Amino acid sequence: MIQNIVFDMGNVLIRYKVKEYVHQHVAPGPDAEILLHEVFGSVEWLQLDRGTLDPEQAITQIRKRLPTRLHPVAQQFVLNWHSNVPLYPEMEELIRQLKQKGYGIYLLSNTSKMFHTFSKQITALQYFDGQFISADCGLLKPDPAIYRAFCRQFGLDITTCFFIDDVTANIESAIHEGMQGFVFRGNMPALKTALQNSGVSLLN
């Protein structure tokens, strides 16, 4: 029986479209592609999410691979990517309804410790019973250990959890560990149907 609904952050609670974000600051072309790969696609970005690197260390290492002209914007991306992240009002409304129905509401996200400085921007988090981020535990989805650590943290039976994430591998791993789950592609009616098919009661 599903008692807890677990949400990813990027592209579930907030819009996280890296290429669009880069193109807001750098015109499409070679420089934009370099920044996409060497910042957002870098080992350092994953190390930030794992909590093994701090932002200044990441910036120093990333700059070594970039031409000098791109140093300022690379620093801006590392430190301020979250400064203007559009929210999904429809998702917040669903979360509010689920909370009203008595479900436990939780966050499980791959993100850096900077989350603790920008999380107040995400108004949906006011309804959450717990927040579990990768940088705090040293684990990254889809490592099965992160789902077990999450459940231990909050004293949850993993079989009572329904996980919503935009990455297929993350949902597959969660299901393998005993959760139910849904790969969210922006289709709210499909998500609501999946929840209802799992026995989750929604407000009419």
Image: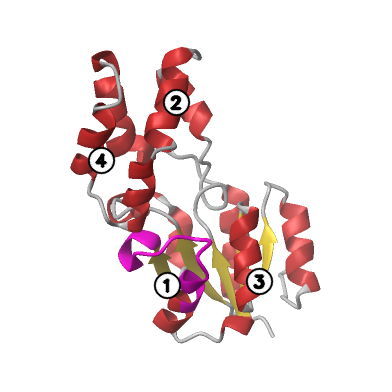
Is 203 on the left-hand or right-hand side of 52?
Answer: right
Residue 17 in the image: above or below residue 155: above
Q: Which mark is residue 58?
A: 4
Q: Position of residue 164 (x, y in %)?
A: 62, 62
Q: CA distance from mark 4 to mark 2?
A: 18 Å
Q: Amino acid at mark 2?
A: Val
Secondary structure under badge 4? helix
Decide: few, some or many residues near mark 1? Use Cα within 10 Å; few <14, some 14-19, many ≥20: some
Q: CA distance from mark 3 to mark 4?
A: 33 Å
> Which is in the foreground here, disc 1 or disc 2?
2
Q: Position of residue 177 (x, y in %)?
A: 60, 76
Circle nearer the N terminus (1, 2): 2
Q: In the rendered image, which residue does mark 2 sit on? A: 22
Magenta stretch holds residue 83 = no
> Which is in the foreground here, disc 4 or disc 1?
4
The residue lying at 51 percent from left, 49 percent from top is 10
Q: In the rendered image, which residue does mark 3 sit on? A: 175
Query: Pointers 2 and 3 in contact (CB under 8 A)?
Result: no
| Near-viewer residue (181 or 145) | 145
Q: In the rendered image, which residue does mark 1 sit on? A: 130
Secondary structure under badge 3? helix
Secondary structure under badge 2? helix
Stretch of the chain drawn in magenta: 134-148
- State which quadrant residue 51 falls in: bottom left
Query: Pointers 4 and 1 in contact (CB under 8 A)?
Result: no
Circle nearer the N terminus (4, 1): 4
